[in-house]
Image (cartoon, grey):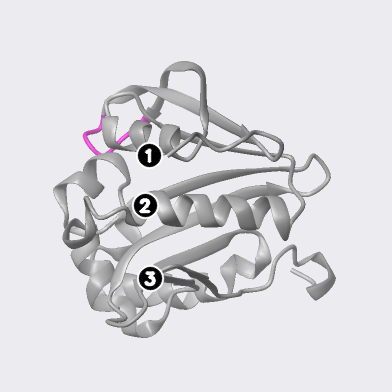
Amino acid sequence: MESQDRIVEPTEIVAGRYQLRPPSLRDVPDIVAMARDEVIQLWNPVSSGADEAKALDWAERYADWDGGTRALFCIYEATAGRLLGMVSLHKIDIENSFGELGYRVAPWARGQGVATTAVRTVTDWAFGFLDLTRVQLIHAVGNAASCRIAEKVGYRLEGTMRSSYRYGDGKLHDEHIHGRLATDPYPAT
């Protein structure tokens, strides 16, 4: 990819007690541990992190945000520095003012508001910095936790796609599609 084709440059964002930044080689042990988690294996398979060599290759590749075609933020607790999860803005289409968001949270960080804070922060960044009009996220209907996060951050449920994606159990699952526009207000907290 030519440098003029790069859409986004790696950056860091502070979001309250969390720091969001590109992956680092020091994350390899946590990437491997996340890849071995049963919930992640089911809803967000990370075959690229299944062993140390694959995790190292993945961290090196995505530290450059895959040549600028996606923005991958790793989520860290700002003082401890341990990897808590990841949020990816991918399928970035500047011409059509669109992006798609995905995320995963490490088992040791669930239930602490990590995903809600990070998804909201990256959504705001997409609307502000990239000037996108729409961001969407898609998750398996059976992944109730992802649905709750989407709704907390103001992503409206727009529909169900039937048998649309094969998840880690090898089965095709129905998926919810949620969308958020830059002009949508956030839900009251």
As measured in the structure, the alpha-carbon distance from the residue carrying label 3 to the one carrying label 2 is: 13 Å
User: Percent from the top left, x then y, of residue 146?
Assistant: 34, 37
Query: Where residue 17 is drawn, which disc sits there?
Result: 3
Q: Looking at the image, is 86 positioned above or below residue 120?
A: below
Q: Looking at the image, is 145 positioned above or below residue 72?
A: above
| Residue 27 part of the magenta segment | no
User: Percent from the top left, x then y, of residue 158?
Assistant: 54, 19
- What residue is drawn where x is 16% and y is 54%? 37
- What residue is drawn where x is 31% and y is 71%? 83
Q: Residues within 10 Å of mark 3 (few under 14, many from 20)?
A: few
As measured in the structure, the alpha-carbon distance from the residue carrying label 1 to the one carrying label 3 is: 18 Å
Q: Earlier in the sequence, mark 1 or mark 3?
A: 3
The boundaries of the magenta stretch are 166-170
Left or right of 19? Residue 37 is left
Residue that label 2 marks? 115
Residue that label 1 marks? 149
As measured in the structure, the alpha-carbon distance from the residue carrying label 1 to the one carrying label 2 is: 7 Å
Q: Amino acid at mark 1?
A: Ile
